[in-house]
Image: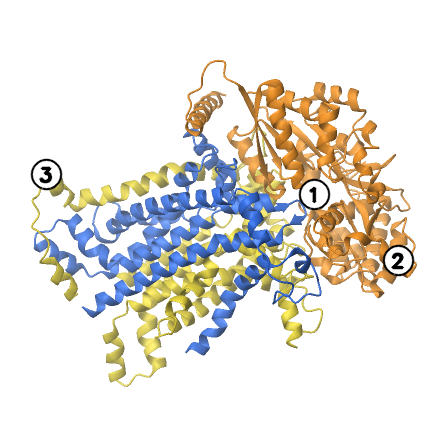
């Protein structure tokens, strides 16, 4: 905070024009600053979104005229086996993935925050999964899980950890779910680790010193200093990641196409199967919007929490 | 400490190692089911890279990816920064609802949104053009960067800014000279993630562009190297490696800057 | 509709602007006509090159410029949906499976064109007809087809003195031996299209079907289906490895190329890749005719066709291109030859095509008097039938049966799912 005032002295006194004065008024500057964002989103999201909602409420079928049918798609979906399975999968997939990413992400961030050799290289390495184009990295994983060439099974068998021929990764319900979750955690972990790291370094060192002086051990310091101060960052990270993970498409599409017997289908993959491949655009839109109200509520609740933390 | 990092590094790096290995193996070894998947025994080959670089338009696609990503990131982070500042700091009519509204747009599922969005792209005359991507990527980048930066701006103490303004700086000057430098970690984070999100984007790129001169790397590679029931594994993985290494290097320097900027501030 | 014309107006100006931006040349009077064609990236890369070359000649001969774009077949659905939704994009698109039915209201009637082609090259094969002849009208011009054939390791069969199977039951007999030799049969049982292909063929050969010819009555619950499931169960138990539950469309190819599988059901791509990549297994692989059952010999086929979007402003030049590519015997031959026996002629009189003589191993591909069908047969491929296909009901019924669900229950499940779709 000393930095701030030290630098302020060097700022030349403003020779204010009228416009500049106007821009100093919050009620003008504020709206002016949010306008570009609102324009972008208003023009490019509002219309498509309204259209998507309309589609979900219609019997829209590719290339045919459509009619408004109210909530029929939503009702019908609930009686579909595949959809209910998907519903369940989405929660299992998101819940487990986010939990793993959170725990591993905090651990990794704490480790990265230490004095390390090869700091640069380690950070770069940790970031790698996040950087490889997803469309290609998931292909790489499907090659690693390949039933014939699986490097995972080969290594496991040769280390004596697995009995040959090793698990049928993408062909059995639980293994397939484990596989898609693993890939999701792999790809999402850097996001958690780096963002949490950024949160960690912003915690003033004095607090830890004070804690140490009061006789708090490492566990206590983590629990009473680090975690509470990380809360706002964690909340935002979890929020983003939950939304991301919920709407994940690529991993399942490449690895299992929803199989075996729909046990890994997610909303996005099922929506594609129904809405695009089968042409039932209305039904597909309904699948992808099914949880929108719930998500809005969750986000609203979580944002309130974040705001309370921040002020 | 370093020992604890090992499992994380193995987890992060092993798939990449395997992809690199795959890209360097000859087809004969790659498709030999008795070969050791962890090593190259029959000598490495650059034939997959050569094919990718000379037989396909990979370079053009990568340039397209880069152009789109850089522009979309710049626009989004700039727009996100000022919006975030306003939402975090300024008091004006409707500030809270603007914030929520921006966030909610983030929830709109993209899995089918691309259909009506394609119409919008057509109306503005950008069909089959990479500029359509520069225009549409901010729709998912702005909410993200706005929210991320809001958090960082809030961590900059209000007093610092107020001091500056007491000393005669305008609010905009205070923002540029005081608040932004202090929010560098946040800005770097926003840039990194915006960059990655657009670098990885697939469905908009697929549907809004089709000419070989306009498509991005992910789309180009998958549509050139997955042919029906044939996967050109060697070249696909070569594409994955070439598509990520330059970015990683960029990231490492960025990250370094972000960490050093931070510690410098703390030392002073 | 008022909004329709407005939209069209906007689209037109939009496309025009984009065109100008892209080429930086303002449109001049009497400028060349130009069409665009979106096709899948052909399995044989040489075929794509040939197509580009033919395109250049076409421009020289007719003065019509053509722009050819490629897309992976897995992405076709998304791309086509977006072109239909925006009423803009390419003039010509390549169709596979039931696409002509799916996009029917958006496709130009090309019956006159197909009549011309049939006059030149003979009748279109049954599968091509089933796929592109929609409600009495040709919505696309059949282009070529890729049949599912039996691909087997002839060398291993000879060494072990195994008889080349002729029926699915024979396959069980040799399959048991193959598995003992460590070279199991490879038929995928997962959520992919190869499973639907082989599953459908077996279903028909046993006299079973998913939906009756009327397209309305679910017929899956039959003693014949039960027989099929029993066959799959014993195949899965005695002739295959559980890995087939995880397979994607590429897995059976890779499996036989790697020297593991002894028998797979697939288009010739498995052999072609082995040959092109010079894999050791290539010499031992050969093909024989797809198998028969108590209900006869029915083969699954993957025909492809070319269609013209109704929103295209260049319907005539687009037709010109189809005429050029498919109607000119020498061009068509050249095109087929570049496809390396993967793309086979779809016309009756061209069945004995020179491409089949380029390699002795293509002899088994000659389909004379074959009953080719597409997914869902004998029901006409309506929007509902293709929903049944795309929901992977058949593969999942088989997967359920082989992983422990009682046959009856698996069939009842499939019946319920199919009925739901037909009712909705």
Q: Which chain is yellow?
A: A
Residue in the image at 36% along x and 38% along y? A42
- A290 vs C317, nearest the viewer: C317
Mark 2: few/some/many CA within 10 Å (<14, 14-19, 20+): many
| Label 2–label 1 contact, CB within 8 A | no
Identify the image quadrant of residue C125. top right
Callout 2: helix, strand or loop?
A: helix
For the residues labelled 2 and 1, the Cα–Cα distance comes to: 33 Å
User: Is B258 left, or right, of A163 in this rendering?
Assistant: left
Residue B255: image location, x then y, percent = 34, 61
Q: Nearer the viewer, mark 2 or mark 1?
A: 2
Q: Nearer the viewer, mark 1 or mark 3?
A: 3
- The extreme top residue here reads C30
Callout 3: helix, strand or loop?
A: helix
Name the residue beneath numbered marker 2: C174
Q: Colour of chain C?
A: orange
Whether residue B41 is situated above or below residue A276 in the rendered picture:
below
């Amino acid at each position: 905070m000393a930095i701030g005032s030290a630098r302020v002295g060097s700022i030349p006194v403003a020779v204010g024009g009228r416009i500049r004065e106007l821009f100093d008024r919050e009620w003008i500057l504020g709206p002016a600053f949010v306008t570009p964002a609102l324009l972008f989103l208003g023009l490019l999201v509002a219309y498509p979104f309204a259209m998507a909602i309309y589609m979900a409420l219609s019997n829209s079928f590719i290339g045919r005229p459509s009619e408004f049918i109210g909530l029929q798609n939503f009702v019908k979906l609930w009686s579909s086996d595949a959809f209910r399975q998907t519903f369940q999968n989405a929660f299992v997939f998101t819940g487990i993935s986010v939990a793993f990413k959170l725990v591993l992400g905090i651990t990794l961030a704490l480790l990265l925050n230490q004095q390390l050799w090869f700091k640069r290289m380690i950070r770069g390495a940790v970031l790698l999964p996040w950087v490889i184009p997803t469309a290609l990295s998931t292909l790489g994983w499907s090659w690693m899980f390949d039933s014939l060439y699986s490097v995972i099974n080969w290594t496991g068998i040769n280390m004596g950890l697995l009995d040959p021929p090793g698990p049928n990764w993408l062909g059995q319900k639980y293994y397939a779910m484990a596989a898609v979750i693993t890939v999701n955690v792999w790809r999402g972990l850097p996001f958690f680790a780096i963002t949490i790291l950024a949160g960690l370094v912003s915690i003033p060192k004095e607090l830890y010193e004070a804690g140490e002086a009061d006789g708090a051990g490492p566990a206590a310091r983590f629990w009473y200093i680090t975690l509470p101060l990380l809360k706002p960052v964690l909340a935002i990270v979890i929020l983003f990641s939950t939304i991301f993970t919920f709407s994940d498409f690529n991993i399942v599409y490449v690895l299992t196409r929803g199989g075996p017997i729909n046990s890994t289908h997610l909303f996005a993959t099922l929506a594609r199967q129904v809405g695009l491949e089968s042409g039932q655009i209305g039904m597909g839109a309904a699948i992808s919007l099914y949880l929108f109200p719930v998500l809005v509520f969750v986000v609203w609740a979580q944002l309130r929490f974040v705001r309370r933390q921040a002020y | 400490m370093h020992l604890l990092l090992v499992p994380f590094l193995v987890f992060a790096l092993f798939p990449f190692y395997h992809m690199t290995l795959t890209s360097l193996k000859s087809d004969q070894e790659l498709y030999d089911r008795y070969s050791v998947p962890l090593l190259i025994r029959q000598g490495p080959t650059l034939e997959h890279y050569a094919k990718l670089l000379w037989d396909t338009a990979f370079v053009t696609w990568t340039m397209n990816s880069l152009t789109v990503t850089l522009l979309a990131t710049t626009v989004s982070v700039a727009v996100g920064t000022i919006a975030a500042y306003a939402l975090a700091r300024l008091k004006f009519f409707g500030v809270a609802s603007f914030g929520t509204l921006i966030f909610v747009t983030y929830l709109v599922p993209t899995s089918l949104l691309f259909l009506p969005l394609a119409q919008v792209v057509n109306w503005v005359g950008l069909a089959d053009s990479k500029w359509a991507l520069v225009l549409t990527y901010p729709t998912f980048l702005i909410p993200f960067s706005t929210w991320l930066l809001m958090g960082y701006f809030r961590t900059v103490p209000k007093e610092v800014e107020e001091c500056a303004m007491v000393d005669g700086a305008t609010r905009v000057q205070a923002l540029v000279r005081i608040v932004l430098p202090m929010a560098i970690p946040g800005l770097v984070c926003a840039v990194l993630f915006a960059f990655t999100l657009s670098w990885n984007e697939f469905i908009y790129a697929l549907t809004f562009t089709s000419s070989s001169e306009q498509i991005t790397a992910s789309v180009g590679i998958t549509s050139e190297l997955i042919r029906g029931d044939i996967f050109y594994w060697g070249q696909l993985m070569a594409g994955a490696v070439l598509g990520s290494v330059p970015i990683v290097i960029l990231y490492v320097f960025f990250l370094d800057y972000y960490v050093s900027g931070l510690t410098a501030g703390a030392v002073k | 509709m008022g909004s329709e014309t407005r939209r069209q107006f906007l689209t037109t100006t939009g496309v025009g602007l984009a065109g100008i931006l892209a080429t930086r040349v303002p449109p001049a009077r009497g400028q060349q006509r130009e069409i665009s064609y979106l096709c899948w990236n052909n399995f044989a890369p040489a075929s794509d090159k040939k197509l580009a070359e033919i395109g250049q000649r076409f421009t020289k001969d007719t003065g019509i410029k053509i722009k050819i774009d490629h897309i992976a077949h897995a992405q076709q659905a998304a791309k086509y949906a977006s072109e239909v939704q925006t009423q803009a994009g390419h003039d010509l698109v390549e169709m596979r499976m039931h696409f002509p039915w799916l996009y029917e209201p958006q496709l130009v009637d090309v019956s006159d064109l197909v009549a011309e082609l049939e006059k030149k090259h003979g009748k279109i094969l049954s599968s091509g007809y089933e796929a592109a002849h929609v409600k009495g009208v040709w919505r696309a011009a059949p282009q070529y087809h890729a049949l599912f054939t039996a691909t087997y390791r002839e060398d291993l069969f000879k060494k072990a003195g195994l008889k080349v199977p002729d029926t699915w039951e024979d396959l069980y007999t040799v399959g048991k031996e193959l598995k003992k030799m460590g070279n199991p049969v490879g038929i995928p049982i997962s959520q992919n299209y190869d499973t639907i292909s082989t599953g459908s063929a077996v279903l028909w050969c046993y006299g079973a079907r998913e939906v009756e010819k009327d397209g309305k009555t679910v017929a899956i619950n039959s003693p014949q289906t039960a027989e099929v499931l029993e066959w799959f169960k014993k195949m899965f138990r005695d002739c295959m490895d559980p890995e087939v539950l995880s397979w994607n469309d590429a897995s059976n190819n890779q499996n036989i190329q790697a020297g593991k599988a002894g028998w797979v059901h697939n288009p010739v791509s498995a052999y072609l890749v082995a040959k092109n990549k010079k894999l050791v297994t290539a010499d031992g692989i050969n093909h024989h005719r797809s198998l028969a059952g108590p209900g006869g010999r029915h083969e699954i086929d993957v025909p492809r066709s070319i269609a013209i979007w109704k929103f295209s402003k260049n319907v005539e030049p687009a037709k010109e291109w189809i005429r050029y590519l498919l109607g000119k015997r020498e061009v068509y031959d050249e095109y087929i030859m570049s496809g390396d026996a993967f793309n086979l002629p779809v016309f009756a009189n061209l069945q004995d095509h020179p491409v089949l003589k380029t390699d002795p191993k293509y002899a088994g591909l000659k389909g004379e008097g074959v009953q080719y069908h597409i997914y869902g047969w004998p029901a006409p491929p309506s929007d509902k039938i293709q929903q049944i296909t795309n929901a992977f009901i058949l593969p999942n019924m088989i997967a359920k049966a082989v992983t422990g669900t009682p046959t009856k229950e698996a069939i009842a499940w499939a019946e319920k799912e199919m009925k739901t779709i037909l009712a909705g």
